[in-house]
Amino acid sequence: MMTSNKEYRKLERPLNDRRFLGVCAGLANFLGISPFWARIALVAALIPGGVPGILIYLIGWIIMPNERRA
């Protein structure tokens, strides 16, 4: 049986890298990108009327738990 050393990332909102509720930072950490790019994507989603971006952000806030302290 082979074992792998994969690093599992959790989709959770960090406690220290937040700007508003931490959704963009949590998503960026999960995807392995800079939070800057996640925030730019949110702003781009807000441009066509605002509703798509706000809805995505609120759903993320509801389903993503806060980061647990060790």
Image: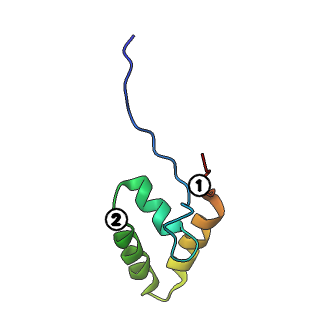
Q: Earlier in the sequence, mark 2 or mark 1?
A: 2
Left or right of 44, for residue 65: right
At 42% from the left edge and 82% from the top edge, which residue is drawn?
A: 43
Closer to the camera, 60 or 65?
Answer: 65
At 51% from the left edge and 76% from the top edge, which residue is drawn?
A: 19
Closer to the camera, 60 or 6?
Answer: 6
Neighbor class of circle 1 (other Cα within 10 Å; few <14, some 14-19, many 20+) is some
* Residue 32 on image: x %, y %: 35, 54
Q: Identify residue type, mark 1.
A: Glu
Find residue 34 and name its label: 2
Q: How many marks?
A: 2
At 66% from the left edge and 64% from the top edge, which residue is drawn?
A: 62
* Residue 56 on image: x %, y %: 54, 71
Marks 2 and 1, Cα distance to the nearest angstrom? 18 Å
* Residue 29 on image: x %, y %: 42, 57
- Give the colour scheme of this rendering: rainbow
Neighbor class of circle 2 (other Cα within 10 Å; few <14, some 14-19, many 20+) is few
The answer to which quarter of the image holds residue 34 is bottom left
Q: Identify residue type, mark 2.
A: Ser
Compared with 52, 63 (above or below) is above
Dot 2 falls on a residue whose secondary structure is: loop
Closer to the camera, 56 or 17?
Answer: 17
Left or right of 45, for residue 34: left
Find residue 48 and name its label: none
At 39% from the left edge and 10% from the top edge, which residue is drawn?
A: 1
Q: Quadrant of the C terminus?
A: top right
In the picture of the structure, the residue carrying the numbered disc 1 is 67
